[in-house]
Amino acid sequence: MGRDLTALFDPRSVAVVGASDDPAKYGHAVAAQALRAPDRRPVHLVNRRGGTVLGRTAATSLTAVGEPVDLVVISVPGAGFEAAVDEALACGAKAVVAITAGFAEAGPAGLARQRAVAARVRAAGAVLVGPNCLGIADNTTELYLASDRFAPGGVALLSQSGNLALELQLRAEPHGLGFSRFVSLGNQADVTLVDLVEDCSRHEATSAIAVYAEDFGDGRAFAAAAAAAGKPVVLLTAGRGTASARSAQSHTGALTTSADVVAAACRDAGVELVRTPREMTVVLAGLTGPTRPAGPAGPAGPGAGVRTRGRRTAVFTDGGGHGAIAADAAEDAGLEVPELGGPTQDRLRTVLWEQSSVANPVDLAGMGEQRPLSYADTVGALLDADEVDAVLMTGYFGGYAASEGGLGGGPAGGSVLAEGETRAAKEIVAHLASAAGKPLVVQSMYPGSPSCRVLAEAGVPVFAATEDAARALAAMTGRPRPVDATRVAPLPRPAPPLSDPGYHGVRALLDAAGVPFPAAREITDEAGLLAAAAEFDGPYVLKALHLLHKSDAGGVALRLADRDALLAAYREMHARLGAPAYSVEAMADLTDGIELIVGVNQDPRFGPVALVGLGGVLTESLRDVAFALAPVPARRAETLLRSLRSAALLDGVRGRPAVDVGAAAAVVERITTVAAAHPEIAELEVNPLLVRPDGALALDARAVLR
């Protein structure tokens, strides 16, 4: 059930330690906010000098309050922080909100102080938000302990940046979005992002969870909590650069960046990953309206689960230019804009005039100016079509009512057109009521017009920018994910540490897990080489061991037809490289095969992260790879393989037969499960994994220990 945060969000009483009359001090802002609801619960102001603060008598200490206090906000200089925490716990506090800074963010000494304080709080059975935070607020319980007001609504905002939170609030207002809760995460010394996501997922008044985080702490636990939330989680994060790949020692490490890991975790957990505050607001506007489609967790509306409706989108406009731009934007957002089938086109022709386009985009071609209700008729026909999952209406709608209302609309159509457009908006809303949860999003040149307000007030997201409308619709429809990817796979129990990280030791580890390899023997001299060659027939492969990238160093010889060719290759290679050991292997049949790479990289935040892609010696140049949190179930692995740019090769091209993708996916599951069970392995890689029409065979493997 997660941690009990009742005392944090609905305390019986509150005290602000460091309350001040000085507007320059944070204790002044928090105290002023706390007094907004004096009748909800007792609010005590504490200032060591006593006197009055904000017209109320201030206690000189928490002890002087004379009664237990459930939640204590501490905004005092760093030197007095520990003493303030100890006094709060002694006075019975069950929750502490620590505004005071100068801890982990200040260096090792500050981190040690922070850990000691957190340990004392936990030992007392209390919870701590911060330190170095900007407070919390809960509109549902009238708890106001942050410096700014947050309009009430259904979004829980969990942020590591105060200013970003303020920007999100400003951007949310035009869309009618408000906030159930706000929590400034601070240093997460005790209460973590994971704790808060879990608690907000249980909070009935929260319909979506918005997160700005730079430090995930336990990223895998965050992904698991988000996957289990049963309501949308939208993430804005920073630092998605390539620095994490600089010290990588394998292809897998060099191909895996921070951005890849975060994106993979979000996709696996069903989190909407956004890049800017504007995009976050757009996505929230789409996800929190009553027309949001249902998922398997329950009915449509706030709190519905993973969104699984299809992405076949009908673009509808009253101008060809808007339709073409919107179609491009929809496809850029990952939506599909297919040509409509004959029956749907025939139905549209019954409500439109001859010059209208009905293929997709659907274009009224001026009919809206003659008959505004044609907007509603067309939307209704599109929502009724089985081949349409969602509708994006774009362009001039709203202009007639805007002109009538003096909002700068286009050619005035008079009150008749304005009234007709508003009536059309009401009919569109009526159509949505019977549309089985199919979403409609609107882009309008006049989003503030009366007719657009009718739509917005009914929960239809309305945007001024085409790309915003397309992004919101993409979030509302959800990206299709296999059933076994609707949650984050748990880590297996740790296995005994790998004792031999050498080439044959790694092969043995994977072989024991069912990963198939060609026959191979490790040798150190010519006698051993000839003995190995006698154990299996050629052609042979010779590899120099203890080289990180054997091919780059000329340490691999292929297609050695017989023992004489093998011996000659050994003598040449040993003279050039002087490797301490070599591997003699049976040459695999490469006919009709495709080389893949399968690797797992241990991320410090998200744990084992898997990579699959086009492999071989050109893997880093091609960079055709996909990522997921490991271990990766076989069904999920097949989905990843088919998401590659080169996926068409798997099914056969130019007369080549299809390869056994199922066999490859099964091997991916085994490799990623082994890696997930061995946290001491920083990077585990099979490259290439040869996939043929008759199965899959691992041709090379390596491991890098932490």
Image (cartoon, rainbow, N blue to C red):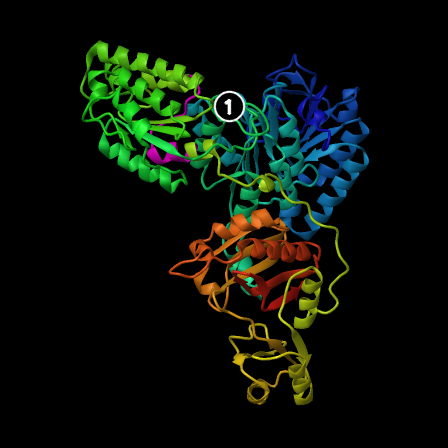
- The answer to whether 191 is drawn above or below residue 17 in the figure is below
Between 658 and 433, the residue placed more toward the observer is 658
Residue at position x 76%, y 36% in the image: 83
Between 367 and 54, the residue placed more toward the observer is 367
Task: Please tell me whether residue 326 belongs to the stretch shown in magenta.
Answer: no
In the image, is 206 to the left or to the right of 108?
A: left
- The answer to whether 527 is drawn above or below residue 325 in the figure is below
- The answer to whether 367 is drawn above or below residue 191 in the figure is above
The part of the image, by quadrant, that contains residue 656 is: bottom left
In the image, is 30 to the left or to the right of 117?
A: left
Q: Position of residue 385 (x, y in %)?
A: 38, 26
Residue 332 visible somewhere in the drawing: yes
Q: Position of residue 71 (x, y in %)?
A: 71, 26
Segment colored magenta: 458-472
Label 1 belongs to which residue?
A: 178
Q: Where is residue 521 in the image (x, y as percent from the top left)?
A: 67, 77
In the image, is 650 to the left or to the right of 695?
A: left
Q: Which amino acid does label 1 sit on?
A: Gly
The part of the image, by quadrant, that contains residue 490 is: top right
Which of the image's four quarters has the N terminus?
top right
- The answer to whether 420 is drawn above or below residue 466 in the figure is above
